[in-house]
Image (spheres, grey):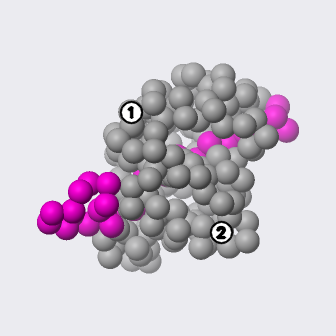
Amino acid sequence: MSKHHVKRLAVLRHSKAAWPVGVPDVDRPLAERGHADAPEAGKWLLANKVVPDFILCSLALRTRQTCTWVCGELGDLAPTPKLESGLYAAGARRMLSVINHVPDTVRTLLVIAHMPGVQDLVLDLASRESDQDAYMDAASHFPTTGLAVLEVDKPWAELDGQDARLTHFAVPRAEGRKHGRGH
């Protein structure tokens, strides 16, 4: 992969959500732990120089709240997120079809969505050249605030499967709740 043509796809599972009685799934808010962990994803993106120039976010409340915390950490570097109904309750193929419509001018894309779609998408896209530790971590568990980073050397429209290199899998947590490796 020629480094100057490489794009990055960061896939983030929303932070820990609450389960309030009588609240529809789409309106579930972040739990206290989610509000604590979500900013850590933004800090991780900054520390690892994976700053998105475009963000696609599921329209569910918990993903929007996660996105707000991440953008708060990115500060002036944060792009205006695009809410995407096609990411709510979506499987990997549906999520990929949303990504396939991203303009090719986007160099680093952040997608904030839900299980099992986020895990399935990452595993479907990961090529044989992927970091094996990152792949095994993503395959064995993709907890809330789980974050995968893949390198892509083709247009978003051509991304199809096993054609992106998984380089990192991390689970940023608030102080005292460290988990996962930051490959």
Mark 2 or mark 1, earlier in chain: 2
Q: Nearer the viewer, residue 56 or 14?
A: 56
The x, y position of residue 47, in whole percent, is 66, 65
169, 73: nearer the viewer: 73
Q: CA distance from mark 2 to mark 1?
A: 28 Å
The answer to whether residue 139 is left or right of residue 5 is left
Magenta region, residue range:
2-29
Q: Nearer the viewer, residue 83 or 171?
A: 83
Q: Identify the residue under disc 1.
A: 91
Amino acid at dot 1: Gly
- Residue at image mark 2: 74
- The kind of residue on which mark 2 rests is Leu
Q: Position of residue 117 (x, y in %)?
A: 39, 38
Q: 10 Å neighbourhood of mark 1: few (<14), some, or many (≥20)?
A: some
Say whether residue 151 is left or right of residue 176: right
Q: Percent position (x, y) of residue 2?
A: 82, 31
- Residue 174 is drawn in which quadrant? bottom left
Q: Left or right of 116: which side holds 18? A: left
The quarter of the displayed image where residue 26 is located: bottom left
Taking the spot 29% from the left edge, 62% from the top edge, the residue there is: 28
List the single residue furthest toward the right.
Answer: 4
Is 27 magenta? The answer is yes
* Residue drawn at 21 percent across, 62 percent down: 23
